[in-house]
């Protein structure tokens, strides 16, 4: 069985890819290979960050590897939060003139409140059209001395009030195209059928099964 590292310790992501690939590849997590380093993610694109992580593993552990990076892009904010999705409030609240003490406790909540506050400040919810956004995932694979990329996107729009209990991150304010519920209301089964991540993983899996 071919061994391949997935530069992640996220149990859900690991299980998803292992179940798609069956017994053709042995997918190892960062923990499995004894990597507890804080791998740098300093690029300005999703592809760049994913490649940085995969190359780090190749360089330090000598193993073929794939890695992912995801985020939300909001059109009227010049595609922010983008690569800063996981740390949007920490990076941008002060720049937007938002008092960080007003954003709540948990990281996801703080990021979402920072985004909503910015969108309200620029009047993004005032017109007839809700702000356009998309979730994006890029996966970089470093295998047999070559680099390959697999991208997945889901288009949609944002709503001004959070709705639903499922999912994580920005799910309570994102409505995918063709639906009238947020990702958090739709639940994991529907989300996993159409999500940016599922689309990128499907492309990676098709490539790995063929090669
Ligand atoms: P990661 O690269 O998959 O860890 O995602 C980085 C950040 O993007 C997360 O911390 C979330 O803020 C946001 N994000 C990525 N995917 C999703 C999603 O499916 N729903 C909501 N937020 C997401």
Image (cartoon, helix red, strand yellow):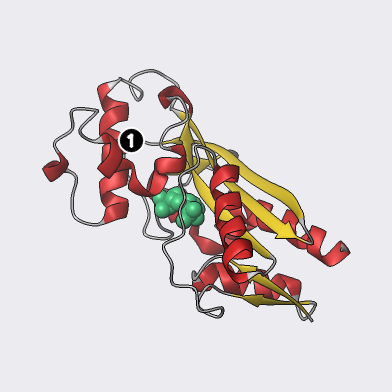
Disc 1 crowd rating (10 Å Cα; few below 14, some 14-19, many 20+) is some
The C terminus lies in quadrant: bottom right
In percent of the image, x 49 and y 34: which residue is there? Answer: 133
Where 37 falls versus 157 (above or below)?
below
Q: Nearer the viewer, residue 123 or 200?
A: 200
* Residue 172 coordinates in the image, percent (x, y): 38, 49
| Left or right: where 198 falls relative to 88 | right
Task: Name the residue carrying label 1.
Answer: 160
The x, y position of residue 64, in whole percent, is 70, 66
Is disc 1 placed on a helix, strand or loop?
A: loop
| Residue drawn at x 80%, y 77% as measured from the top left | 24
Quarter of the figure with the N terminus: bottom right
**Residue extending farthest right:** 210
Q: Is residue 197 above or below residue 26?
A: above
Residue at (32, 28) in percent of width and height: 119
- Which residue corresponds to the image point at 46% horizontal and 38% vertical from the top-left? 82
- Tell me: 28 left or right of 22: left
Q: Looking at mark 1, is its residue's CB closer than 8 Å to ligand 1?
A: no
Residue 76 in the image: state x and y as whole percent: 43, 23
């Amino acid at each position: 069985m071919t061994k391949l590292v997935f530069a992640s310790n996220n149990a859900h992501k690991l299980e998803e890819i292992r179940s798609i690939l069956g017994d053709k590849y042995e997918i190892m997590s960062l923990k499995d290979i004894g990597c507890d380093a804080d791998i740098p993610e300093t690029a300005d694109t999703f592809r760049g960050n994913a490649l940085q992580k995969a190359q780090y593993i190749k360089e330090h552990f000598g193993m073929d590897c794939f890695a992912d990076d995801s985020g939300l892009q909001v059109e009227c904010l010049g595609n922010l939060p983008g690569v800063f999705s996981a740390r949007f409030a920490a990076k941008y609240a002060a720049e937007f003139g938002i008092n960080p003490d007003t954003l709540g406790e948990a990281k996801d909540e703080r990021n979402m409140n920072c985004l909503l506050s910015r969108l309200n400040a620029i009047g993004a919810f005032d017109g007839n059209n809700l702000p356009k956004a998309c979730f994006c995932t890029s996966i970089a694979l470093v295998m047999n001395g070559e680099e390959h990329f697999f991208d997945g996107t889901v288009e949609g729009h944002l709503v001004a009030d959070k709705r639903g209990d499922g999912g994580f991150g920005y799910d309570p304010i994102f409505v995918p195209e063709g639906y009238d519920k947020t990702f958090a209301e739709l639940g994991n089964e529907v989300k996993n059928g159409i999500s940016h991540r599922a689309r990128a993983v499907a492309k990676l899996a098709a490539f790995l099964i063929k090669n």
